[in-house]
Image (spheres, grey):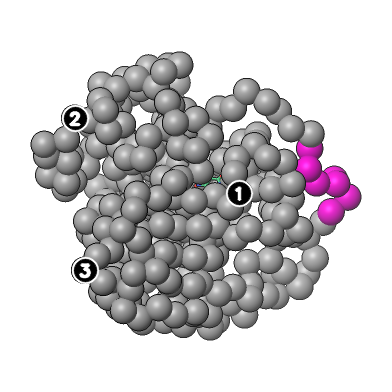
Amino acid sequence: MIIRRTPPHPIASSEITPESVYLNRRQFLEEAGLLSVVALAMPSDLGRSRVAQPQSAYPTTMGSDLRSELTPWDDVTTYNNFYEFGTDKSDPAANARTFRPRPWSVRVEGLVKKPADYDLEDFIKPYKLEERIYRHRCVEAWSMVVPWLGFPMADLIARVEPSPSAKYVEFITLNDAKRMPGQRIPVLQWPYVEGLRLDEARNPLAFFAVGVYGKMLPNQNGAPLRHVVPWKYGFKGCKSIVKIRFTDREPRTAWNLAAPDEYGFYANVNPNVDHPRWSQAKERRIGEFRRRATLMFNGYADQVASLYSGMDLRKSY
Ligand code: MTE
């Protein structure tokens, strides 16, 4: 995302990743049943190859036609927006190294029949993890193709049973400036909040990710849990989620609060609606020079256009 102020660098450069962080990761993977993926973990130069792409141990349920377009691992994990760790694209990879995404709990609350506090492992356990290769289009007009690992959002919704009055679901990032030093600087209202209409969240494309490229999510990509909605601009995907709240009101989302004229609630990828400060007609796929035409709903119109029938997508941007 583009903002107009550059805050001072929030983290001392002397901070290094202790071994215990990696040990914790191993423990998490064992408990979450992800260890077999790590056994298959490929060196990062394999991820960079455009010819031989790594195979996942998990079934690809959507997007296998995009496998030849995968953005290399190095780019997926070093070119990130995660303002809790700084506002430059390289900041999250550098500054999130010491972040510990474990122990981690996820609270489901609000208008729901089965509210609960889950340990991350219990939250994930009932689901069969699958790979989804999705186009990922940032509002800043760059894009990637990313192989996420996770499970459909609809499965969680069925498990917790929202009440009939629930119309929206809100996703909330951890709010802890000691662990996320970028939160010491008020570039956004913390915690980061995103939201979806409940019917959007039930769409089969909406996904919770716990991994990428067959590995556990790196911190900078939103460890240990984020959501992904590939037909929307990247900012709709909330990272490092600790709360999922069902509500009858449209959530006040972080970017909408920061700049309501620029970032609407819907944030559907739409080449026909310019951002007030730049065109959205084209995008630069990371690793390519030629700019591509941006596709309506990021290429997912067949699956999602009906969610917005009757809406004026210039007003509901
Ligand atoms: N979630 C939180 N908590 N904080 C953020 O700053 N940035 C958003 C989104 N989710 C952000 C966030 C933006 S602007 C984008 S483009 C995507 O994360 C980037 O995700 P990526 O690192 O996987 O590319």
- Horizontal arrangement in the rendering, residue 233 relative to residue 191 (left or right): left
Q: Residues at badges 1 and 2 in contact (C-beta under 8 Å)? A: no
The secondary structure making up most of the magenta span is loop
Residue closest to the eye, 31 or 190: 190
Q: Is residue 55 visible?
A: no
Q: Residues at badges 3 and 2 in contact (C-beta under 8 Å)? A: no
> Which residue is the site of mark 2?
312
SS for tag 1? loop
Q: Does 14 appear in magenta?
A: yes
Extent of the magenta region: 9-15
Residue 300: image quadrant is top left
Q: Is mark 1 within 8 Å of ligand 1?
A: no
Q: Inspect the image, locate mark 3, and give the three-letter code of the amino acid beneath it.
A: Pro
> Which residue is the site of mark 1?
190
Q: Position of residue 237 (x, y in %)?
A: 43, 49
> Which residue is the site of mark 3?
164
Q: Is residue 258 visible?
A: yes
